[in-house]
Every structure is written in C-alpha cells, then in structure tokens.
Amino acid sequence: MTTELIEAYKNGDLILFVGAGVSRALDLPSWNELISQIGEKMGYDRDVFHSYGDALALAEYYKLKKGSIGPLRSWMDREWHHEGINILNFPVFNAISRGNYPIVYTTNYDRWLEKSYEANYQTFRKIISVNDLVGLPPAMRQIIKYHGDFDDDNSIVLSESSYYDRLQFETPLDIKLRADVLGKSVLFIGYSLTDINVRLLFYKLTQMWKLYGHSTARPKSYLFATHPNPIQETVLGERGIHMITSEISDPGKALEKFMETLNESLS
C-alpha cells in the first residue's frame, strides 16, 4: 500500500468504485443463474439457452420479448435480498460504510451498500439519476448506482442495448463522473480484469484525463487485485492505474485485510 494512497484516503480525496466481487461473500445468485432464470421464463432448456448467446444478448432477447425487464428485476430483487443476510457480519461492507470515502460508485444493482450504511448509522444520498443531485448538501456522502438500481427498471444496465448506451459515457452521471475523477484518486475493488466492460471503463477514464486535464498532474488511481498479473499491471499502469496485490491467497480475506488497513490509517 503506497503512501500516496493512504494520504488521499486520509484527506478524503479517494473515490471508491465497488464491483460485483465485493458482494461475492453474500452468496448472491451468479450471472449464470440469472441467465438460467431468463431461459426458464422464456420456456427454454437452461443449457440450450446458454448456448444461444452471451449474457447481454440473452437479456436483450428477454427485454424485446417481454417489453421490459420488470418481471426479471422483481426476481433479482427478491433473490439478491433474502432475509438470511445480516450485513453487519461482512467486514468489507462495514469497512466501506465506516470509511472516509466522500463518493462511492458501484456497478452493482443490489442494495447491500446502502443497507450497510444504514446498519452503521451513516448518512448518505443514493444517486440513480441527475434528479437525485438536486439539493444535495455539500458534505453529504454519495452512493452512485452507476449501472442502475432495483428501484428504477429503466436505470438498470443489463441488456445489450443498455450496455452500449452506458459505454457511450454521455449521460448526466458520466458528466458527474468526469468532474469527480479530475481532482481525486480512484480505488477499484471487486473487479475482474477479464471483464472487457471494466477495462473499457479504465480506458475511458484515461481519455477523460487527456481531454480535460494534464496527465502529469493526474491523481493516481488504484485497483486492488488478489493475485499479481504483470501483463495487466503494465497495461493499467500505462493508463495511470496502479495495481495493489495481496499475499493472502483467499480473495475475500485479502480484500478484508486491505480495507481494514486503510481504515486503521485514520487513527
């Protein structure tokens, strides 16, 4: 862990980006289970349906046939938020909600980040659209649902067309993102480097700096990964993103220790 990262965190100059890997400990349904559910709802054999395309295309098919993702969203909402989860038992969520992050972006649809803030008596504003920014107090902590939220079907980035729209980076939330990252460092946790959408996000952030800021003055950004990857380290390093790895073999424990160490720097 670098001195620059710790200083940015202590000064409230670190934006957190939270991916699906953070929620893995909650044992939520996987993408494969989600696609299988779509296939069942459409009357297909699970294995046959999986063979007809990738997740985005199959979700697009569902949306076209059903007219909306409403019924699917309802199923996801129920399955992602079953009553057996006590969010206070999950250290990474506690570390986030008790941490010194003025802004948290997440590409997750579920409400567990918000539930963690509430369980730890932390005030925040959830932001799904530009309307949620109206009247926002300057010091209010923010959770930006970058790929949508279960409270708004139209906000959810799930189908192929919604992903293409999201990756244009031209929505009001993208304008906000540009403003947020120009003066602060960014820490990514819970992301897989095999995900092309994530790598495209990193690339777009780099392009923002080239267009709107001086690359030499750019605050450093970081990605926590459980295992070293010299190829990705080189590629991301070229884009101003520094990989941080752990010697702990268990991914969940590694992330937990990393987040706790950051919080300990505040004392």
Image: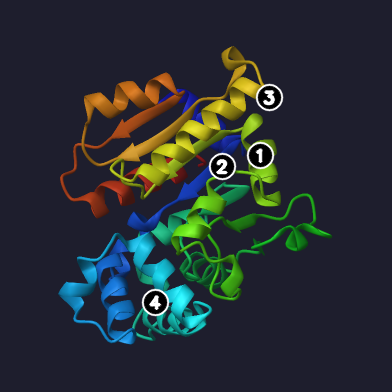
Contact, CB < 8 Å: mark 1 with mark 2? yes
Q: Quadrant of residue 226?
A: top left
Of callouts 1 and 4, the N-terminal one: 4
Residue lying at 25% horizontally and 68% vertically, measured from the top left: 32
Residue located farthest toward the right when viewing the structure as drawn? 135
Mark 3 or mark 1: whose residue is earlier in sequence: 1
**Measured along the vertical axis of the image, is residue 238 above or below residue 28?**
above
Q: Could you tell me residue 243's position as x and y percent? A: 34, 30
Pointer 3 local density, CA inside 10 Å: few below 14, some 14–19, many at least 20: few
Q: Which percent across, then down, holds residue 108?
A: 46, 61
Cα distance between the residues tagged 2 and 3: 18 Å
The residues bearing labels 4 and 3 have C-alpha atoms spaced at a distance of 38 Å
Q: Are marks 2 and 4 in contact (CB under 8 Å)?
A: no
Other-residue count near label 1 (Cα within 10 Å), few / some / many at <14 / 14–19 / ≥20: some
| Residue under the image location 57 percent in, 71 percent down | 118
Q: Amino acid at mark 2?
A: Ile
Q: How is the image coloured?
A: rainbow
Q: Secondary structure at mark 4?
A: helix
- Please tell me whether mark 4 or mark 3 is closer to you in this view: 3
Name the secondary structure under disc 2. Answer: strand
Along the polypeptide, which appears first: circle 2 or circle 3?
2
Residue picked out by circle 1: 180
101 up-or-down from 209: above or below:
below
Q: Is residue 117 above or below residue 265?
A: below
Q: Nearer the viewer, residue 121 or 217?
A: 217
Q: How many C-alpha atoms fall within 10 Å of the one at disc 4: few (<14), some, or many (≥20)? A: many
The residue beneath circle 4 is 80
- The residue at which mark 3 appears reads as 212
Disc 2 vs disc 4: which is toward the camera? 4
Q: Determine which of the numbered discs, if any, sits on residue 15 in the image.
A: 2
